[in-house]
Amino acid sequence: MGGDDMAPILLVSAAALVDVDGRVLLAQRPEGKSLAGMWEFPGGKVDPGESPEHALIRELHEELGIDTWESCLAPLSFASHRYSEFHLLMPLFVCRRWAGQPHGREGQALRWVRPRDMRALPMPPADLPLIPALIDLL
């Protein structure tokens, strides 16, 4: 591999929160962040020494004000996508059980969306390949 191919790996955990109607929660990236205005699966960076599951539980609490448990997170798929500054590796977990009502604690808009309707929304390139797995699941 040449030096040009090397990019730091960024590990990000994401959740497909599924409601009783089979819809999945998407959050809109706020103004001022990269990919602002795009709709994405909630989640965030995995800190050093943290498991992807623990990072996701922490991020869901911080971003959405909900609590869930490792036993409620089922790995579904993952994204591997090269951005210019880094290579994103993002496991996607399905979660159907949590405590609390999701709300945008950081001012972000939220929307419950059926997987087949996700392609109509602007989503980050890394998230798009995850949609077929959700359509198959739901």
Image (spheres, grey):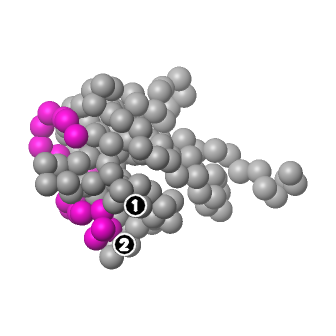
- Secondary structure state at the residue bearing disc 1: helix
- Tell whether 97 sits left or right of 89: left
Q: Is the stretch drawn in magenta largely helix, strand or loop?
A: loop
Q: Amino acid at mark 1?
A: Ile
Residue 94 visible to the viewer: yes
User: Which residue sits at x=53%, y=23%?
Assistant: 49
Camera-side residue: 32 or 122? 122
Drawn side of residue 125 relative to residue 101, left or right: right
Judged from the image, the secondary structure of the residue bearing numbered disc 2 is helix
Q: Residue furthest bottom?
A: 120
Q: Is residue 23 above or below residue 55?
A: below
Q: Is residue 108 visible?
A: no
In terms of depth relative to the viewer, which is nearer, 28 or 113?
113
Residue 60 point in image, percent of width and height: 29, 39
Q: Which residue is pictured at 36% across the width and 35% down the height?
A: 74
* Residue that sits furthest to the front in the current view: 136
Res. 66 image quadrant? top left
From the top left corner, tell me how far across and down residue 108 is, in percent. 26, 58
Tags 2 and 1 touching, CB below 8 Å: yes
Circle 2 residue: 119
Q: Residue at x 48, y 61 (%)?
A: 129
Q: Is 2 colored magenta in this rendering?
A: no
Q: Is residue 65 left or right of residue 133?
A: left
**In the image, which residues are magenta?**
96-118
**Amino acid under label 2?**
Arg
Crowd class of label 1 (few under 14; some 14 to 19; many from 20; radius 10 Å):
some
Q: Position of residue 13 (x, y in %)?
A: 44, 41
Earlier residue among tags 2 and 1:
2
Residue 94 position by quadrant: top left
